Image (cartoon, rainbow, N blue to C red):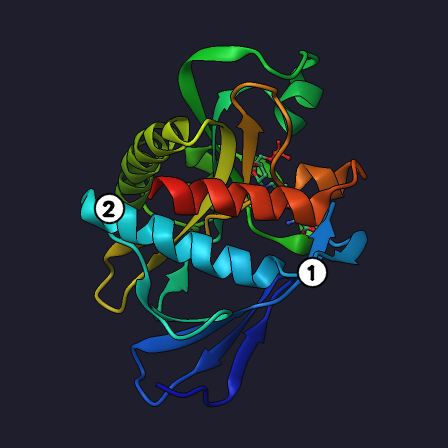
């Protein structure tokens, strides 16, 4: 499978057409941004780690019956995925308070919830990804009621699988962001990536942050954290 013309360049990935109209190649970059692109930098080796990690986790989810866009890893940074039209929602699941949840509701980070929460943001850089609920998403025709029900069910199922997996590697899955897409026949599948860019991972023993918050908050040791979380994944899977 070879890359044809570039279809799109995002903040962390490029997407290429292939000779097969149903397949695309995603190419992971080392570029890192935060706060809707206001903070920019490079995390050396991030693209390689995010590509590998996302592919390994998506294959694990497929085995658990969760449909994903994953097809085949080509090399360190390049992966063949099914072509989808992305549902323009960022789907965020939280198990523990952190980040924008703590800020919005004025609570400390680290409160363990009795049950996970779900929230949606409208994927729109110009509007700064505003929070919205299912009714708003339907009103804006971003997704149908049935699609939102499917997305909710899949997102909570992903959480159960990932939480259990990371627990085995001594990592607490605090929260994460998912994106879903529609195949040409309308089937909803998990798309985008699952990586330290899109999840909060805390060491279960020490509470050390092993994710992109090290970059967002200038905590240092960013590359080391990405390498450590990748090592935990490889040792556990
Ligand atoms: P938040 O606490 O800043 O809302 O982030 C919740 C989770 O979503 C966290 O694991 C990081 C991830 N996330 C993204 O993947 N992309 C984004 O643009 C944002 C804001 C968060
Ligand atoms: N997606 C954010 C950005 O647009 C980065 C983040 O906070 O994860 O820069």
In this rendering, is residue 133 above or below 212? above
Nearest the camera: 150 or 56?
A: 56
Q: Secondary structure at mark 1?
A: loop
Cα distance in 3D space between marks 1 and 2: 31 Å
Q: Quadrant of residue 158?
A: top left
In this rendering, which labeled residue sits more in front, label 1 or label 2?
1
Nearest the camera: 76 or 146?
A: 76
Q: Residue pushed farthest front?
A: 235
At 81% from the left edge and 39% from the top edge, which residue is drawn?
218
At 61% from the left edge and 20% from the top edge, which residue is drawn?
206
Nearest the camera: 108 or 127?
A: 108
Residue 192 showing in the rendered view: no
Left or right: where 75 falls relative to 8: left
Q: How many marks?
A: 2
In this rendering, is residue 92 above or below 82? above
Residue 2 is marked as none
Q: Secondary structure at mark 2?
A: loop
Residue carrying label 1: 44
Tell which quarter ligand 1 is in. top right
Left or right: where 8 falls relative to 135: right
Nearest the camera: 67 or 43?
A: 43
Mark 1 touches mark 2? (CB < 8 Å): no
At 46% from the left edge and 27% from the top edge, which residue is drawn?
170
Q: Residues within 10 Å of mark 2 (few under 14, many from 20)?
A: some
Residue carrying label 2: 66
Counting from the top left corner in percent of width and height, residue 233 is at 43, 43
Counting from the top left corner in percent of width and height, residue 229 is at 53, 41
């Amino acid at each position: 499978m070879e890359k044809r013309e570039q279809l799109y360049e995002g903040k962390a990935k490029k997407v290429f057409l292939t000779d097969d109209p149903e397949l695309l190649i995603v190419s992971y970059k080392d570029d890192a941004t935060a706060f809707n692109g206001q903070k920019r930098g490079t995390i050396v080796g991030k693209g390689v780690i995010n590509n590998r990690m996302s592919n390994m986790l998506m294959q694990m989810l497929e085995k658990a019956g969760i449909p994903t866009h994953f097809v085949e890893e080509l090399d360190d940074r390049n992966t063949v995925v099914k072509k989808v039209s992305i549902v323009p929602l960022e789907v965020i699941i939280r198990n523990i308070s952190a980040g924008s949840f703590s800020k919005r509701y004025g609570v400390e980070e680290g409160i363990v919830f009795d049950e996970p929460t779900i929230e949606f943001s409208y994927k729109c850089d110009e509007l700064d990804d505003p929070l919205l609920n299912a009714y708003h998403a339907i009103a804006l025709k971003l997704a149908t009621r049935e699609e939102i029900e499917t997305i909710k069910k899949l997102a909570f199922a992903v959480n159960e699988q990932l939480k259990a997996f990371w627990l085995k590697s001594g990592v607490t899955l605090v929260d994460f962001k998912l994106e879903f897409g529609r195949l040409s026949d309308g089937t909803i599948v998990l798309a985008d990536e699952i990586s330290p860019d899109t999840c909060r991972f805390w060491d279960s023993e020490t509470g050390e942050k092993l994710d992109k918050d090290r970059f967002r908050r200038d905590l240092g040791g960013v590359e080391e954290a990405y390498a450590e979380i990748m090592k935990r994944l490889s040792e556990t899977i």
